Image (tube, rainbow, N blue to C red):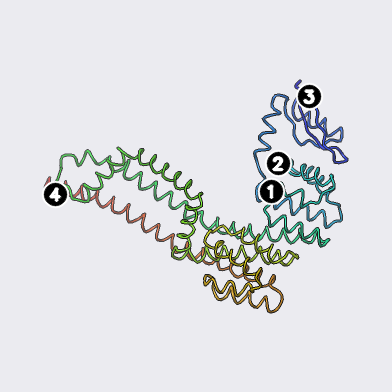
Amino acid sequence: MADFVYKAVQRDGTITEGHLVAESQDAASRSLRKQGLTPLQLAEGKQKATTIQKTQGKRPSRDDVLVMTNELAVLLRSGLPIDRGLKILIEMSHKDEVTQLLTDMLETVKGGKRLSQALEPYEDVFGSFYISMIRSGETSGHLSKVMTGLVGYLEEAKAVRSSVKSALVYPAILFVVATLSIIVMLGFVVPQFEALFSDMGDGLPLLTRMIIAAGDWLKAYGIFMALILAASVWLVRRWIKEPNGKRWLDNKMLKLPFLGGTIFKYEIAKFARTMGTLLGNGVSVLHSLSIAIGTVSNTQISETLAVLEPAVKQGTRMSVALEETEAFTPMVVQMVRVGEEAGNVDEMMLELAKVYDSEVQAGVSRSLALLEPIMILGMGIIIGVIIVGILMGILSINDAVM
């Protein structure tokens, strides 16, 4: 028998803590459920502190937020109050970090506060856009409808991210295979012929001598070069997290051939989708601008968009401010202008996001369609040169013998 410490939810939604003695953790869980308690945390007494630390250290992922939002939207549409919906989500949750978050939200809501107020301590998980959408739903009295729209937004954003990531998987695998193939050829295959060529000296063809020298250099300094490369990658990643490094990288990314325009459209699509969704749910223009600009990860684009807030405050139309930056395509400016004239900026922003999302996927496909044969051709040329160099050495030996 062992002593277990637990934290659980009672049928009325209150949180209770205590301990019990059971043969195993499963037995302890069954015992709690027989008492009408839903376990949130359950561990042996000596493991309590470790379990709580692990739960507090982890944060729900984007997928967790999407699932949570979808399930809560369904429950609210069915007519359940928020506190009852949160209780059901707690019972359905299988992740400690999600359960802990939902429990904190439930306690806040039961204390008389709004759902948006319960989300504010977790802005790093949900983001200001999400919280503003919930707040607009509470103000308008259509929270379930707003949450349904929020689910659609999150699913669309996830689909765009997934399509880009999945498209990059094959080139990444190809690059790793090509690199390993060249290392194996120079580090293991070429040295096998070194003894055969040792007596030839300068009689070997220049290409053969260069390949043998490259193989010797890789055997002698390969580990050191790998360590230097790893340290360089670590330093560069650390540098680009700083403002100056990120600004430099973002600027270079926009200037990349083929991919630069795609990156620009990807960021503008995020801005337009966020802006359109917020405006459509009654959020003010200035607040929507502030949140939408915050979703743009490219520093150069976000700094360019930052001129919109002061311009709108001074009474300037958003389309005019965009045109004056000279950084946006005529299509962006014209769609915003049409939306302003027709009084449906939100709809035009969402249309712009759809157009750019499709162009982003097409741009990624075109770039990868060009990149893949270049990588295959490059790998083939390097391996071919190594093989030709070895064959030239073998032929030179035959000529010397004859």
Label 4 crowding class (10 Å Cα cut-off): few <14, some 14-19, many 20+?
few
Residue 4 vertical position relative to residue 318 in the rendered view, above or below:
above
Q: Residue 64 carries which label?
A: 1
Q: Which amino acid does label 4 sit on?
A: Asp
Q: Relative to 136, say whether 312 is above or below.
A: below
- Cα distance between the residues tagged 1 and 2: 9 Å
* Residue identified by numbered label 3: 22
Mark positioned earlier in the residue sequence (3 or 1)? 3
Question: Could you say whether the residue bearing mark 2 is in a helix, strand or loop?
Answer: loop
Q: Name the element at disc 4.
A: helix
Q: How far is the residue under mark 3 from the one under mark 1?
A: 32 Å
Say which quarter of the image contains residue 378.
Answer: bottom left
Q: What residue type is labelled 3?
A: Ala
Where residue 287 appears, as percent x and y from the top left, is 69, 62
Residue hosting label 4: 399
Left or right for 213, reference 269: left
Disc 3 versus disc 1: nearer the observer: 1
Q: Along the horizontal axis of the image, is 395 left or right of 49?
A: left
Q: Name the residue under label 2.
A: 95
Q: Please, what is the three-letter code of the amino acid marked with disc 2?
A: Lys
* Residue occupying the far right of the picture: 12
Lower sequence index among marks 3 and 2:
3
CB contact under 8 Å: marks 3 and 1: no
Label 1, residues with CA under 10 Å away: few <14, some 14-19, many ≥20 = some
Q: Which of marks 3 and 2 is in front?
A: 2
Q: Do the residues labelled 3 and 2 touch (CB within 8 Å)?
A: no
Q: Are marks 1 and 2 in contact (CB under 8 Å)?
A: yes
The first of marks 4 and 1 along the sequence is: 1
Q: Which of marks 4 and 2 is in front?
A: 2
Q: Is residue 197 above or below residue 272?
A: above
